[in-house]
Image: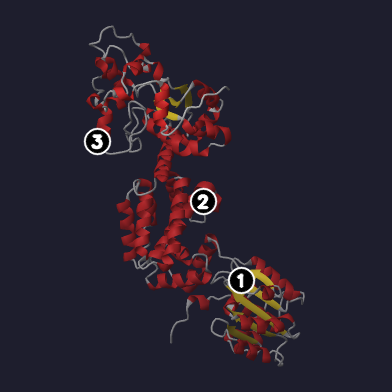
Amino acid sequence: MAQQSLYRRYRPRRFSELKGQEHVVRALRNAVATHREGQAYLFSGPRGTGKTTSARILAKVLNCENPLEGEPCCECESCKSVEAGTSFDVIELDAASNNKVDDIRELIERVNLGTPGRHKVYILDEVHMLTPGAEAALLKTLEEPPPHVVFVLATTDPQKVRDTIRSRTQHLSFHLLNEKELEEHVRWVASDAGIELTDEAVEAVVRQGGGSARDTLSALEVVAAGGGVAPEMMPLDEFVESIIERDPGRALAAVAASAHLGRDARSIAEAVLAHLRDCFLSIMAPELVQLPAHRAEVVSEQAHRLGAAAAVRSMEGLGDILVEMRHAPDPRVLLEVALVKLTSETAGSDMAALLLRLERLERQVAQGGIGTGSATGPIPRPVPTDPNTGRAVLGGRAKQAAASAPVPAAPTDPTPAAPQRPAAARPAPTAAGPQPEPAAANASAAPAPAPPSAVGGDLVAVFDTVVRPGLKGMAKALYVVAQPKGVRNGALVIGFPNQGHADKAGQYRADIEKALSAAVGAAVTVVIEADAAPATTPAAVETPDPIDHEVDLSDLQSAPPQEQGTHLDRIASSFPGSNFVEGSA
């Protein structure tokens, strides 16, 4: 004879034995004790939370010969027949398989028949599976049932039940059990059944149960069959560590290890998403995390290294692929691509990469500063910049090499094309020969005085991609032509076409500084300046127009003598057939 499963063996027989549903127990016991039971109930909630069990307990107590304070005695013949499934007073119908109009009509025809007990209880499980015609057939009887009939409708999706049916019932919602309640229940069942469990096995059983008492006992039965040792679990910590360390290979290896344990892509994504949610809650609301103490410490440490923003982006990415997996030919490919995007800096969008850099800067600030020369770790990655504008150079090694090359031929001119501001603190050169030396000195000393020099290119990028698009009204109109020139002495220099434009834009400098500081996570100063007019510089006057160099003077010809004449002759030639008429104005 097959052994009875644990969830059937330890199914509650009284309301007081229900776990985690105190609000439902209180409502039903009070209704029975005061003889105010309803004519129809709607029990809704996730699977394995006690909906059908509560309906059977209600049927027992309504027909019990010796009820006590709203509880069945479980000793009389009526209670025993209900537990054995042989009672004529309780009729159970699975609406998922008996969902047609004819099935409901047959049920309605028997409603008016007499019953041996005080009440006849109809239990309709998964009532949301009824067809529209079956719901319509049930509606009238549900509204005005005979006095001795009680309907109990159970469903996992109450939103699919017709509103007219819900309005005619007393709706009681069942919810999932928390980790503490499930752990206590598992240890009690294991002790009563003589099952030896390790702490790791209890944790694994509770995690697999997912808040459902029935699923938890089913998982306990599997662990008990394996000797009370916890089964090998998915490496959830490896997924989060791969996101923290930006290691796509580590994430793909974790997927392969999980698949080797027999988990499909969807269950892997759901488990990782649940783990990321625990990380997010441990940052935003630690009191909501329902984990054992030792696991809560591990998740909290991992979460603070991950960061709330990265956790949110990761949950959004996995949530999107869970929707796409419904119609994907190979869901594992979607999962692997999503994990590569989450763990790789180059696979995502430019905005996502910028946000990652900002998060690194915030962590640096929290640890004591930004971008000093002695900073260690993989965070401060050198960014090539253009020496003329201070902007970050986005490209390959060729652009980086070009940016670091010395300026050609221009230093041989004794007249400098533009004054170099960093050289103001040093004496001006007196000869043309040593002029390249200050330029080289400036190039080597430029990053030194600016505290956030390691993020100079990032400040320009932050202004272009974060601050400028967020401006409103007049500030947006003024800064649309702004040209960020880079970092000078720790401040971001922003140029404007003329002095008047710069003066008006300076009125919003505080707002720009505030937005930059919020984005970077450190105080940022902004310098507003006007660009010099190119026509006023001697170099611009003496420099010929590049268009003139493209003209070959040998191609020019003098006007023929016959085309020369008075201005009247030239006008007449321009308008053939015209006549001059003399007159007075």
The circle drawn on residue 281 is: 2
* In-image side of 143 versus 479 (left or right): right
Question: Reading the chain from its start, which is encountered first: label 1 or label 3?
Answer: 1
* In-image side of 91 versus 417 (left or right): right
Judge whether 516 appears above or below 75 on screen: above
Circle 1 packing at 10 Å, graded few (<14), some (14-19), many (20+), is: some
Between the C-alphas of marks 1 and 3, the distance is 63 Å
Q: 582 or 115: which is nearer to us?
A: 582
Circle 3 packing at 10 Å, graded few (<14), some (14-19), many (20+), is: few
Between the C-alphas of marks 2 and 1, the distance is 28 Å
Residue 268: image x %, image y %?
40, 62
Q: Which residue lies most toward the top here?
A: 430
Which residue corresponds to the image point at 41% horizontal and 61% vertical from the top-left? 269
Secondary structure state at the residue bearing disc 2: helix
Question: Reading the chain from its start, which is encountered first: label 2 or label 1?
Answer: 1
Give the quarter of the figure containing the C terminus: top right
Give the quarter of the figure containing the N terminus: bottom left
Q: Nearer the viewer, mark 1 or mark 3?
A: 3
Residue 123 visible, this orientation: no
Residue 355 visible, this orientation: yes
Secondary structure state at the residue bearing disc 3: helix
Q: Which residue has dot 1 on it? A: 158
Q: 286 or 29: which is nearer to us?
A: 286
Which residue corresponds to the image point at 48% horizontal and 67% vertical from the top-left? 209
Mark count: 3
User: What amino acid is at disc 3?
Assistant: Ala
Q: Which residue has dot 3 on it? A: 398
User: What amino acid is at disc 1?
Assistant: Pro
